[in-house]
Image (spheres, rainbow, N blue to C red):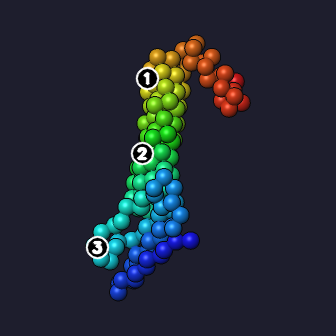
Amino acid sequence: MGTWRRYVYPNGTSYHEFTSHKTCLGLPFIHYTYGRNPQTGKRVVAKGFIAVGRMACGIIAIGHASLGIVAFGQLALGFVFGFGQLASGIVAIGQAALAIFLGLGQFATGYIAIGQIAVGTYVLATAGFGRYVWSMTTKSAQALEFFRSLPIVRHFIP
């Protein structure tokens, strides 16, 4: 299926890397890294169609810092979807969600922004800023109508 590289340091820490033999779009289908490379002493960036590691770059990237079409991690820079503490993408979900279309998070931005503090065109937030805002202090008729029309939201809103 692929090649494993493993090394255990005298102090007990270890290095693991898996690279699949199968490729997709010129990348290994799966690339997984863990720990510091014993030859360079540095962390290896996981690069693959599915990339998993502390730092990951791929179509689907999973890691503390990840960059991909779809990204999951503490810092998730997704082009289409990001999920993490700081997430970006067309759709982003996270503590800080910086989205183009839909942002969901404690701090959220996007055309539709839902969060504790949110900035966008249609905003549902405790403190919201934008064109049509439904917040603790502002209740735009357009925002009320828009959010009530969303199938998932109408079950929770009177």
Crowd rating for badge 3 (residues with CA inside 10 Å; few <14, some 14–19, many 20+): few
Question: For mark 1, does the 10 Å Cα neighbourhood hold few (<14), some (14 to 19), or many (20 or more) residues?
Answer: many
**Residue plotted at (43% across, 67% down):** 33
If you read the primary sequence from the N terminus, does the residue marked by circle 1 or circle 2 appear first? 2
| Spatial separation of the CA atoms under disc 3 and disc 2 | 26 Å
Secondary structure type for disc 2 = strand
Closest to the observer, 17 or 131: 17
Q: Is residue 151 above or below residue 78?
A: above
Instruction: Please give the residue where the numbered disc 1 appears in the rendered image.
Output: 129
Tell me if residue 69 can be seen.
Answer: yes
Q: Residue furthest bottom?
A: 10
Residue named by callout 3 = 41
Residue located at (68% from left, 32% from top) = 152
- According to the picture, the residue beneath numbered tag 2 turns out to be 77
Mark 3 / mark 2, whichever is N-terminal: 3
Callout 1 amino acid? Phe
Question: In the shown orientation, is residue 39 left or right of residue 80?
Answer: left
Using the image, determine if residue 62 lies above or below residue 13.
above
Q: Nearer the viewer, mark 3 or mark 1?
A: 3
Residue in front for this viewpoint, 97 or 51: 51
Q: Secondary structure at mark 3?
A: loop
